[in-house]
Image (cartoon, rainbow, N blue to C red):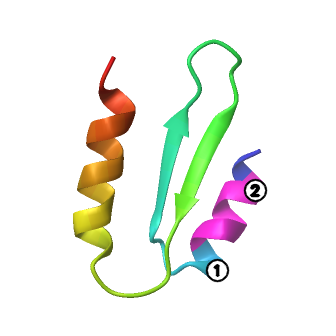
Amino acid sequence: MDAYISRIQTSFDDQVIVVEAEESGNKILFAYKGNNFSLLAKKITGRASDP
């Protein structure tokens, strides 16, 4: 799985957020090309950690 994440990170200039799924051991990736990634990353990270 890490090889796939690495490929995605390379394709999206490391503008990737990896979120662990709660029970399944799966991962959800959000990838973004463009400006303002840091703002989007904060929003996504905040929402993903909310119960």
Crowding at mark 1 (Cα within 10 Å: few <14, some 14-19, many 20+): some
Tell me: residue 11, above or below residue 42. Answer: below
Q: Please report the residue visible at 66 percent of the width from the left and 68 percent of the height from the top.
A: 8
Q: Please report the residue visible at 26 percent of the width from the left and 40 percent of the height from the top.
A: 46
Q: Earlier in the sequence, mark 1 or mark 2?
A: 2
Report x, y in % for residue 43: 27, 52
Report x, y in % for residue 18: 51, 47
Which mark identifies residue 1? Answer: none
Secondary structure found at label 1: helix
Between the residue at mark 1 and the residue at mark 2, the CA separation in whole angstroms equals 12 Å
From the viewer's side, name the closer residue of 2 and 48: 48
Mark 2 sits on what residue? 3
Q: Using residue 46 as the reference point, say whether residue 17 is left or right of it.
A: right
Tell me: residue 22, above or below residue 47. Answer: above
Q: Using residue 5 as the reference point, say whether residue 51 is left or right of it.
A: left
* Amino acid residing under circle 2: Ala
Is residue 7 a member of the stretch shown in magenta? yes
Q: Please report the residue visible at 76 percent of the width from the left and 56 percent of the height from the top.
A: 3
Q: Please report the residue visible at 49 percent of the width from the left and 83 percent of the height from the top.
A: 33
Q: Which residues are magenta?
A: 3-9
Report x, y in % for residue 12: 56, 78
Report x, y in % for residue 37: 33, 73
Locate residue 51: give its quadrant: top left
